[in-house]
Image (cartoon, rainbow, N blue to C red):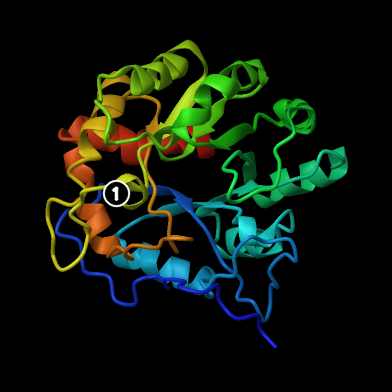
Amino acid sequence: MPAPKSPGWLDWHPSPSVPRFTLPPGTVDTHCHVFGPQARFPFAPERKYTPCDGGRDDLFALRDHLGVARNVIVQATCHGADNTAMLDAVRASGGLARGVATVRPDIGEDELRALDAAGVRGVRFNFVRRLVDASPAADLAAIARKIAPLGWHVVLYFESADLPDLEDFFASLPTPLVVDHMGRPDVTRPVGGPEFTRFLRFVEANDVWVKVSCPERLSITGPPALDGETRAYTDVVPFARRVVTEFPDRVLWGTDWPHPNLTGHMPDDGLLVDHVPHLAPTAEQRTKLLVTNPMALYWP
């Protein structure tokens, strides 16, 4: 019997709109996931949530509907360190997807090389306390040392308030770094204030790429990307635009489909595409954000 979904779980949008904004040819969605399907790829016993199914066929259908060319599929925490569902999706993409895995410190060189051959290009370190029990620095440092010879990167997921305690460790890692969702800034604080400025200086001082993704997670005042809203998440826009302006060659974009653990609303993915020009107002910025940068990182 499939495990029931977590109470209050919001399923992904069943009928996203057709975007008004036409994505440039070759656009890469650098942050999306697959959930199961549970009957084929069971969720990890130690998971913190049980999602709906959101498998590779659903992801690829959305890709084509939105006008996206390629995906980077990030291992979902509901699958733990069993990367089978993610790898299945990457292999089924016909070369149009790459993967970001979750691995344990004792992983061997042969397994890493097999992941590399399958299309994995990074590992994810999760520091969000509600999603993981612990993120021991020694174990993560050991993983980073093992993946560095492959040319992989480390994807970091953390809350902005925790950066002061983590940035020295992050800077010590021997790989490029990719930060999910702009480090989850508190968008009720000034974009020019000390907290976000500290994040920007961390990016400047290290080999860091930044995903200007998940405005639906960061927004406090919205409005949400629903019901044809063309100016969604206006409170997040100044933060993303500042990152795009300061680091045009190191920014990435992603949908975060199927949007795990949202509680307030489930966005229309077509409207998330329409949000892109607000983050990157010029055609040059958008080409770098959506095509040039992700291709350099994942398909060099």
Q: Amino acid at mark 1?
A: Pro
Residue sitting at x 63%, y 61%: 78
Residue 153 placement, left or right of 197? right
Q: How many marks?
A: 1
Tell me the quarter of the picture where residue 138 sits: top right
> Which residue is labeled 1 in the image?
25
- 33 or 80, nearer to the observer: 80
Question: In this picture, is 14 found above or below 199?
Answer: below
- 10 or 142, nearer to the observer: 10
Where residue 7 appears, x then y in whole percent?
51, 74
Residue 6 placement, left or right of 226? right
Residue 300 seen in the current view: no
Where residue 245 appears, x then y in whole percent?
25, 23
Residue sitting at x 17%, y 44%: 234
Residue sitting at x 66%, y 59%: 87
Question: In this picture, is 213 found above or below 296?
Answer: below
Tell me the quarter of the picture where residue 187 sits: top left
Residue 127 seen in the current view: yes
Where residue 197 appears, x then y in whole percent?
34, 17
Q: Which residue appears farthest toward the bottom when viewing the image?
A: 1
Residue sitting at x 70%, y 37%: 135
Circle 1: is it few (<14), some (14-19), or many (20+) Cα within 10 Å?
A: few
**Which part of the image, by quadrant, shows the N terminus?**
bottom right
Question: In this picture, is 190 found above or below 256?
Answer: above
- 8 or 210, nearer to the observer: 8
Where residue 108 appears, x then y in whole percent?
87, 41
Tell me the quarter of the picture where residue 210 sits: top left
Secondary element type, mark 1:
loop
